[in-house]
């Protein structure tokens, strides 16, 4: 059987771009159990309430939901357990220095397989206020209207 290649996205956190201003992104590996990998390959994961936190100089991913594997037995995993993230020490120190500043958090953006290995894309982000969210929605709507007007003008000419 040929080895898997390329990037296969399992789950995305679209709400993160609405709730947070993303400043920097990192790619991290995840330490998973066998049934978690099988469940991820079936596409059964959710990142909506996920976040990453430091415990004893290690980075852990909490709050993500990976459904139990349907054909699993007593060896099945807990759906919302804490999962260890695998990063280089230099990256961990950079992230921890950024997170120590007030208002910053680590949010998972995507969960995917890269060449057969489970990865998560983490973002160092700052929470948006309500007026920031309204402003970004207004900008998107203005851009859509401008593109629509330009398209109508080009089609009419």
Image (cartoon, rainbow, N blue to C red):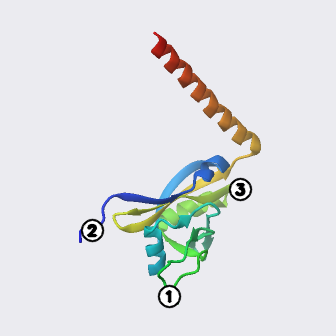
Is label 3 in a helix, a strand or a loop? loop
Estimate how packed mark 1 is, as few (under 14), some (14 to 19) or many (20 or more) residues with alpha carbons within 10 Å. Answer: few
- Tag 1 or tag 2, which sits nearer the N-term? 2
The answer to whether any part of residue 31 appears in the image is no
CA gap, disc 2 and disc 1: 27 Å
Outermost residue to the top: 157
Q: Does the image show residue 64?
A: yes
- Which is nearer the N-term, disc 3 or disc 1? 1
Choose between 114 and 150: the one closer to the eye: 150
- Rate crowding at label 3 as few (under 14), some (14 to 19) or many (20 or more) other CA atoms within 10 Å: few
Look at the picture and state if 54 lies above or below 122. Answer: below
Which residue appears at 54% of the width and 51% of the height?
24
Residue pointed to by mark 1:
73
State which quadrant residue 46 falls in.
Answer: bottom right
Q: Which mark is residue 46?
A: none
Q: Which residue is drawn at 55% across and 23% down?
A: 148
Tell me whether the residue at label 3 lies in contact with that at label 1, contact meaning CB atoms closer than 8 angstroms. no
């Amino acid at each position: 059987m040929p080895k898997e290649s390329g990037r296969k996205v399992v789950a995305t956190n679209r709400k993160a771009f609405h709730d947070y201003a993303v400043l920097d992104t990192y790619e991290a590996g995840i330490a998973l159990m066998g049934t978690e990998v099988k469940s991820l390959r079936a596409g059964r994961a959710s990142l909506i309430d996920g976040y990453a936190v430091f415990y004893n100089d290690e980075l852990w991913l909490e709050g993500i939901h990976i459904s139990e594997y349907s054909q699993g037995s007593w060896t099945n995993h807990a759906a919302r357990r804490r999962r260890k993230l695998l990063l280089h020490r230099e990256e961990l120190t950079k992230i921890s220095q950024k997170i120590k500043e007030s208002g910053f958090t680590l949010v998972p953006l995507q969960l995917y397989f890269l060449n057969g290995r489970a990865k998560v894309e983490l973002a160092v982000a700052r929470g948006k206020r309500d007026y920031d969210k309204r402003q970004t929605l207004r900008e998107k709507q203005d851009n859509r209207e401008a593109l629509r007007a330009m398209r109508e003008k080009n089609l009419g000419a």
